[in-house]
Image (cartoon, grey):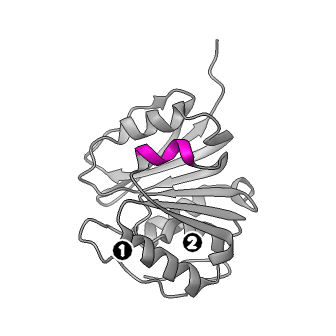
Amino acid sequence: MRVAAGKAKGRLLKGAVSSEVRPTTARVRAAIFNILQASLYRDARVLDLYAGTGSLGIEALSQGAGWADFVDLDRRQCAVIQANLKTTGFSAQARVRTGAVLQTLGNLEGPYQVVLLDPPYKLQEMDEVLEAMASTPDLVAQGGMVVAGHSRHLELQSSHGSLRRVSQRRYGDNAVDFYRNEVESE
């Protein structure tokens, strides 16, 4: 697996050490960053949840994000993320946290302009995770985007609090939903 674009383009990333991890394919990573406006994440804070190898957050850093936080439950995968950050030269622009996503959300230092998550397909609680993100104060910046990768067989709700789905794309067995953090009308 390699970084698709930007400063670290072509750099080889270490893969998964856990059978639970399903790294986001290069095709899907490239598509996500082609869809996102670079002005949204350039020099901004990015969050990579269920980070696995860190490929999504590292892609954001490579393409100009200023900072990335990574969260994964598996300590071995967190070591892989640290190694991949070192290989790509982004260690000084990142922090890796070991823990369960739902328990970690309230301890993160947002707001984030972009939140990327592509959990294992067996995770069926994606709507619960998105709802928790929407209800965590100052997690997602106003106008920020949440990019949720999942199995195409899982249909996510169109909104969660102030998060509104603005686009959905399908790539083989993968689906990617894009949610914008918008002000709720009163």
Answer left or right for 8 relative to 24. right
What residue is rendered at 56% in x and 71% in y? 58
Closer to the eye: label 2 or 1: 1
Write down the quadrant of residue 57 in the picture. bottom right
- Disc 2 vs disc 1: Cβ atoms closer than 8 Å? no
Percent across and percent down for residue 152 are 30, 50
**Quarter occupied by the C terminus:** top right
What is the magenta segment's predominant secondary structure?
helix
Percent across and percent down for residue 150 are 35, 52
Residue matched to label 1: 76
Answer left or right for 169 relative to 179. left
Tell me how far mark 2 sits from mark 1, CA to CA: 17 Å
Q: Is residue 103 magenta?
A: yes
> Between 82 and 184, which is closer to the camera in this rendering?
82
Query: Circle 2 sits in a helix, a strand or a loop, which is it?
Result: helix
User: For the magenta stretch, what is the residue range?
Assistant: 102-107
Query: Circle 1 sits in a helix, a strand or a loop, which is it?
Result: helix
